[in-house]
Amino acid sequence: MIIALAALSLGIHGRVAAGQEDACNFALLGSRANLEVLDTCSSQLLEGLGLGSDPSEDFDPEQQTLTCFGIMRGLGSQFGYANNTRRVCWETPHMNLTSISCEVLNSIAWELMVLALRHLALCTGLFGDIAEEIHEAMADEVQQLAGAVLSREIEMQDSAPTGLLIGEKLRHLHTDLVQPLQAQGHTRQVVSRLLAFGRKAFEHSNWMVWRDTHFVWLHDSLREGRVVHTAWGPSERWEELGANDAHTASSLIGGTSRAPAYGFVNEGSQRQDILQNLLKKLHQRRGGEQIHVVEIGVFKGSLSKFLLEKLPFVTLLGIDPYIGKDGTFPGDFSETMDPDVALAQAAAVYESYKDRAQLLPVTSDVAARTIPNGSIDAIFVDGCHLYECVDSDLQIWLPKLAGAGALVAGHDFSPQWPGVVRAVHEHRLDSQRVYLGMDWTFWWYVE
Ligand SMILES: *[C@@H]1O[C@H](CO)[C@@H](O)[C@H](O)[C@H]1NC(C)=O
Ligand SMILES: *[C@@H]1O[C@H](CO)[C@@H](O)[C@H](O)[C@H]1NC(C)=O
Ligand SMILES: CC(=O)N[C@H]1CO[C@H](CO)[C@@H](O)[C@@H]1O
């Protein structure tokens, strides 16, 4: 069954300005969508809505669009994000089933998002004035179309191997989409549901690609008994990203037989979001008390600022010796910013929260001397990334933690920094829990 978007356009045919092709007059195919057609159509619609024609990453999430039901924010950004997520699918081309599942989900999401955009363009008068009752009635039609495309897709996925990865997700998204609408404002509801579908589908794609790639790489490493360079790509890849010790041989004691109990958890796509979620939960578990957090490796203070801004219950101690470029921390930070400039920026952040934030520009072991045992609720280890450093940070700071349930988290559990992997592994041998999330984040709770 081919569901024709043309059916939807019956009401508007002839309204498209003379000489202007309606590039969006195509049949909805779900996972078999023609991406070129979608590109042309969405470019046209985005331009019509005053958003520029090429969805790129730098769309402003605050950018406002005047629509038939009021101002919308971030519409362009969502298309930029969508466009980028397509590339995520092929980030790790060896993960065939994951890549294909990712692409299937993305194609469906693109179609539904373009459907939303098109409906928005229609009711916003891009193709001429249409009475409100008509675009309200069209919204119902759009919801039914989208629902039907999804049902068909779910049916196909049920018998396909990709169904294992995306079947359940599609079912949930379908349920959300076809919920009965509230009496007023069908257009607004349907458009937001279709866009929400896109957002969730892209989040799921990112997570799926991340989890599966991370899992395969970790599995390979444990089997070899050392950090290897498989699913995430060769070690040369990491060198391009700046200072690192990707080539350092890092053995993992006992390999699989003595490994920690690794678990893959989706707590958000960036470390700041993950940490925010974990600290919120910790705050609840600790009865709503103020939470004392130590951040090892502050640099210019972006993470500190985020946490202080978002989490009023956090008291933060930031530690960073501001040594400068010595190859022990990641990325191109040391290339792009002078340590004095970084320190000045971080100091300004801490200054503006000085009632609950303190920055110590010293090494982690020196800072630790002033901190009593059992007084800290959470640490985030993101300083020097070499094995010796991470191992020492963990040894120094674990006694500072306030007993059971305290959080140990950190960054760069990755093939780029095998020393981090080795240190975490050695601290959690023999089936102790270690959670792995996106953005190379790791964490566990003190037992
Ligand atoms: C999406 O990104 C590609 C480049 O990766 C670009 O060629 C294309 O025009 C973009 N826009 C749309 C609507 O897909
Ligand atoms: C803090 O804990 C460490 C490690 O258990 C121990 O060696 C040290 O003596 C403790 N310090 C104090 C002041 O109790
Ligand atoms: C389409 C695709 O990604 N194919 C890949 C499947 O996995 C093999 C083995 O890892 C790769 O060589 C293919 O490129």
Image (cartoon, rainbow, N blue to C red):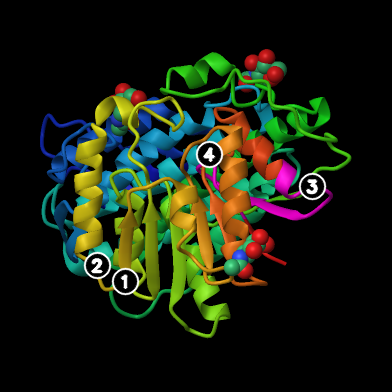
Please name the residue shown 53% across and 26% down the image: 90
* Residue of label 3: 429
Callouts 3 and 4 close, C-beta under 8 Å = no
- Seen as rendered, the residue at the extreme right is 257
Q: Quadrant of residue 67?
A: bottom left
Query: Residue 280: percent from the left, percent from the top?
Result: 48, 71
Please name the residue shown 57% across and 64% down the image: 400
Callouts 1 and 2 close, C-beta under 8 Å = yes
* Residue of label 4: 412
- Residue 354, compared with residue 194, is above or below; it is below
Name the amino acid type tagged 4.
Answer: Asp
* Residue of label 2: 353
Q: What element does badge 4 sit on?
A: loop
- Residue 330, compared with residue 398, is above or below; it is above
* Residue of label 1: 356
Name the amino acid type tagged 3.
Answer: Leu
Does the segment drawn in magenta span residue 311? no
Select label 2 or label 4 by which is in front: 2
Gap between marks 1 and 2 measured at Cα = 6 Å
Q: Quadrant of residue 71?
A: bottom left
Q: What element does badge 3 sit on?
A: loop
